[in-house]
Image: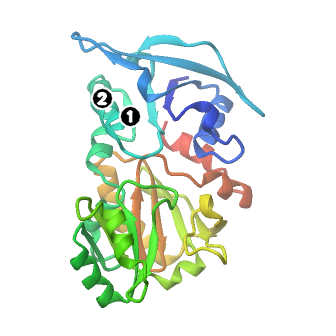
């Protein structure tokens, strides 16, 4: 069997019972695949282009993740490398993608392609698919954002480097905090943010559709916002409900699948609200544990088998 490396946040920070990365690792162990994990600061390279990684071999996952002590190997030791580090996409993340380019030159499969991760902003990338996204602008200028609010009446403001619903605001023209929200998010006109038309269908869920090598899982995870929040993220109190893909969901996947395949984005989470694509998540998309628990579909097994 192969040897797989997972690049993660500190392993002790992963929530064992619901983390997608943990579910994928458990499936690898079930299939007798040797699995290691490493953080992004545990790579090194020299003038001979030898890329080395200090990693821990995972031996068992029950209530805790058990592993052997750290070992150092050339990257060629592994047949596949999974980038599962959460955002933000900062300088450390950026430098990791540069290092992993050398691994690709050695015909090691990197999931997802580090070059594609580097050039693919999870918010901005939807602009390539203007026929299936809500009215959207990206700007640091308050005047343009306010004009957009006048046009759409209610909008969502998002930072371009956020995750899990952090830093997102729903605003309208009569919001007395509007100016200070824009000033704070744009750092007084110095930082780009995204503004999107508010989609009322959010009450029925923000769907996460996992797409593996261009093909979707048969179920999405619809994240339903609580009564106390407009955000549907599970980290903000949303409730995840597995749903069979709708006809519109399938059309959205078909619309973006060639792009994903061409870019070697093998594990992707599409976010869909109502008829619209809102984000294309490529760093560490989640949601498969809830799908597996609520259906008879073993999502982790499907993903690992599809990537063999």
The percent position of residue 210, horizontal first and vertical second, equals 51, 57
Q: Nearer the viewer, residue 297 or 77?
A: 77
Q: Nearer the viewer, residue 137 or 108?
A: 137
The percent position of residue 176, horizontal first and vertical second, equals 43, 83
| Residue found at x 22% / y 71% | 141
The percent position of residue 198, horizontal first and vertical second, equals 43, 81
Q: Nearer the viewer, residue 27 or 119?
A: 119
Check the picture and name the quadrant holding the N terminus.
top right
Q: Image quadrant of residue 37?
A: top right
Q: Are marks 2 and 1 in contact (CB under 8 Å)?
A: yes
Q: Which residue is under mark 2?
A: 104
The image's colour scheme reads: rainbow
| Residue found at x 25% / y 48% | 119
Q: Earlier in the sequence, mark 2 or mark 1?
A: 2
Vertical arrangement, residue 109 with respect to residue 265, above or below:
above
The percent position of residue 16, horizontal first and vertical second, equals 69, 40
Q: Residues within 10 Å of mark 2 (few under 14, many from 20)?
A: some
Q: Residues within 10 Å of mark 1 (few under 14, many from 20)?
A: many
| Residue found at x 37% / y 47% | 265
Q: Which residue is under mark 1?
A: 110
Helix, strand or loop at mark 1: strand
Vertical arrangement, residue 83 with respect to residue 259, above or below:
above
Q: Image quadrant of residue 140?
A: bottom left
Q: Is residue 308 left or right of residue 31?
A: left
């Amino acid at each position: 069997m192969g040897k797989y490396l997972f690049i993660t946040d500190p392993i002790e920070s992963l929530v064992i019972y619901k983390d997608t990365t943990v579910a994928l690792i458990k499936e690898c162990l079930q299939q007798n695949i040797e699995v290691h994990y490493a953080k992004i600061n545990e790579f090194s390279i020299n003038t001979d282009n030898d890329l080395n990684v200090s990693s821990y071999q995972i031996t068992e996952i029950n209530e805790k993740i058990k592993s052997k002590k750290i070992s150092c190997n050339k990257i060629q030791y592994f047949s596949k490398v999974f980038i599962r580090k959460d955002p933000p996409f900062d300088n450390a993340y950026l430098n990791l993608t540069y290092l992993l380019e050398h691994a690709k030159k050695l015909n090691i499969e990197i999931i997802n392609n580090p070059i594609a991760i580097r050039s693919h902003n999870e918010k901005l990338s939807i602009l390539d698919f203007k026929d299936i996204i809500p009215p959207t602008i990206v700007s640091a200028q308050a005047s343009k954002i306010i004009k957009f609010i006048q046009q759409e009446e209610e909008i969502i403001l998002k930072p371009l480097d956020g995750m899990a619903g952090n830093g997102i605001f729903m605003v309208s023209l009569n919001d007395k905090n509007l100016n200070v929200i824009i000033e704070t998010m744009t750092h007084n006109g110095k930082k780009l943010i995204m503004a999107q038309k508010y989609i009322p269908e959010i009450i029925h869920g923000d769907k996460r559709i996992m797409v593996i090598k261009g093909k979707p899982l048969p179920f999405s995870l619809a994240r339903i916002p609580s009564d106390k929040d407009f955000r549907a993220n599970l980290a903000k109190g949303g409730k995840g409900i597995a749903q069979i893909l709708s006809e519109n969901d399938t059309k959205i996947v078909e619309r973006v699948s060639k792009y994903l395949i061409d870019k070697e984005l093998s594990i992707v989470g599409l976010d869909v609200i109502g008829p619209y694509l809102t984000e294309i998540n490529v760093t560490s998309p989640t949601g498969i544990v809830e799908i597996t628990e609520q259906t008879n579909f073993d999502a982790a097994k499907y993903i690992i088998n599809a990537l063999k």
